[in-house]
Amino acid sequence: MSVPYLTARRYIEADRQTTLDTVRRELNAVVNALPTQIQPTEREAFLDAILHDLEVEPEAAWHSWPEDVHLLALTAIKFLGRNPVGSETLLSAQHISILIYHSCLPVPGPLAQTPASPSPCSTTAREALKVLANLLVLSAAGRTKFFRNGGADAVSKALAQPKRDEKDEAAHVERIFLLGRLGFLVCLERPDAAKGMVEADVIDALVQHLMTLPVVPAHYMALSELLKLTNALLSVYPYKSVDKSGQNPWDEQFDIILYPLLHLFYEIPAVELSPPLTHVINALLSVPFLPRLLPTWTCVPDTTIEPLSSPTSTVRTLLHKLGNLASPSSPRMQLAPPRSRSPALGDSNSASSSPRASLSGGRPFGSGSSQHKTAFPARLLKVLDTFFSTYLPYPKKPDDKWPQGLVPDEVLPPVLLLLTRAAVGCDTMRVWMKGTLLPPTLDRTPEAGPIEKRKGLLGNILRLMGCGGHTLSKVSAGEFMWAVCNGDASDLSAEIGYGNAAGVLLEKGFSGPPPAKITELWDESSLRPISMSGQPVSHPPDASSPITIQPATPIEPRHPITGLQDRDDRQDMNEMSDEEKEREAERLFALFDRMERNPVISMKSGEGQAKGIQDIMRDKLEKGELEAWQGKDDEAERRKQEEQEQIDETEALREIQQYKQRTGRS
């Protein structure tokens, strides 16, 4: 049975101001129609007719409609616009202006809202925002038209509007979600839009929402869209300058966004790599570790900030209560809690007299608090470890099959790159990460097995460095370990072995193993440096240079390939006890037993009958042939030593004779 096509004729011919039943019936037919029931030409006719009824002019039909018909008309436009074929009419400047008006976005001119306009959180306004969001998702031209119609500035102003006394909190959160999505889409790959939104104080608005929106699962979608907008702004904004490395473009006006991002980073209870945590990590990747931002990077933000519900409250009021960042000279840089600053950055009275003091008394933090300074990498490593334990449980390898739909190269590189930036940008974090992953107490005995095959986070990272199927994750893991070892090729090889570090070093231009690194350790009892061999060094310590001991500095000799202890397990027979000799003999006989089972290497006796190696060795042992061999070896070694002593003695006598001749004493 064929499904009849739906036409726009009956809707167009109806008196849409008086025959509301007909209007409802036709609009419901559009909403409930299958995608194949409406031809492209009919879709365009429907859109033109409905948008004509929604025009801003006072004589437009929608002014006489009840709210349910008004909402139904916008819903019909949303369903019709889901198919880009036949809905191109939505891209006209006039139709986009109509949708902006019904979405209650704050725009100047004839589309400006009046006191009689519905609430921005009304169902009709949110439905119009959904229509615009779908349009911007499906059409790049729609994003351009929306920007040219003032959409970017309107979204910035809408985000900055103070929250009204809304009874429906869910409606307010949904509007924030839609505004965040519109802002993200309009500034995507459009630097001029990003610049306009920043100039319209969208950063201040984002700070307000990120700090005041409760971090609960019901708000995760809204937070994700706000974070995507933040990341898009930081990524496409036309920066005028870059940092000294030339890699991280940045502008001082973005400094204030770091604190809210860290607030969410610590406040999100889950440590799984899923939104909104992944969006926080992606946004933090765009923030450099500048010296003036380090006090904020190393603080744990307060999480007890109350929402701003008063219409007179502004984002600036919130910012003035958050505390000071590193440099007190810049009012926009004053953000981190006063107790998170180093005493050298301001006097003791500045914190107490700050107008932000009411909201700056968060978790204790001071310049000497190493716990807070390392909280950021600690949480990142926990996130990474949770991911491995969930999706790559030991002994599963990175090249094994992953759960369906999970692509490691999409989720792992951001975390690893952020850890890398933390190690490069903050030496305190780097030293802590090295001491955590490569502690001095790490079991490096050969009995414990290769480091890259062990259970735990370090083993997972090293296995990721050696995988062949996930290039981005492999490179990111290598860069992270390179940064943890402070970019020192010798240190990296000593810590994880050249076998694990070879790929990274090849990328860095090392065609072979790096030279060995000799590190001096200071003996606290004698204040004398001790070399890698364990012998004291003759020169005294230099008082002008600080004494620093790396957490994982190798003390015992390590194998250059594996990074394990490089010890000689071969012992002289004379040093072995009788029990050790017996165990060694049993091990050899067990080996001989396995060998004689192999017909390829089986031996025959003089009578032509097959005879096992074990029997042959037993016969030789009983006849004393093995002891005779040992005696021959000892005799050869003794003769060699006597010959060397004779040569040394002859050489010494010749040198004495030459000395006497030179001095005239002969």
Image: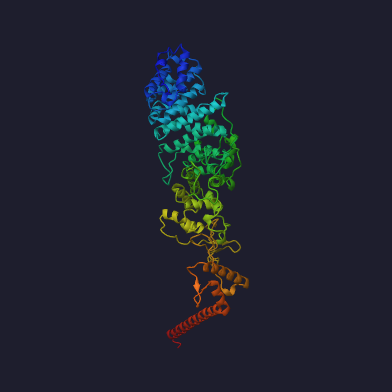
* Image position of 463 (left or right of 148): right
Tally of marks: 0
Give the x, y percent position of residue 366.
Answer: 59, 44
Give the residue at the far right of this rendering: 579
Residue drawn at (56%, 32%), measured in percent from left and top? Answer: 218
Which x, y percent locates residue 225?
49, 33
Colour setting? rainbow
Is residue 569 shown to the viewer in this render?
Answer: no
Q: In which quarter of the image is residue 55?
A: top left
Q: In this view, does 438 lie above or below 526?
A: above
Q: In this view, does 553 lie above or below 664?
A: above
Residue in the foreground of this view, choosing between 406 and 225? 406
Task: Say which quarter of the image contains residue 361.
Answer: top right
In depth, the one of 396 and 587 nearer the eye is: 587
Q: Residue furthest top?
A: 18
Q: In which quarter of the image is the C terminus?
A: bottom left
Up/down of 605 relative to 205, above or below: below
Q: Quadrant of the N terminus?
A: top left
Nearest the eye: 517 or 599: 599
Is 463 on the left-hand or right-hand side of 190?
right
Instruction: Reply above or below: 575 against 323.
Output: below
* Residue 602 percent location from the top left of the image: 50, 70
Taking the spot 58% from the left edge, 78% from the top edge, the residue there is 622
Q: Nearer the viewer, residue 171 or 583?
A: 583
Q: Which residue lies furthest to the bottom in this view?
A: 666
In x, y percent, where is residue 253?
47, 36
Q: Is residue 88 visible?
A: yes
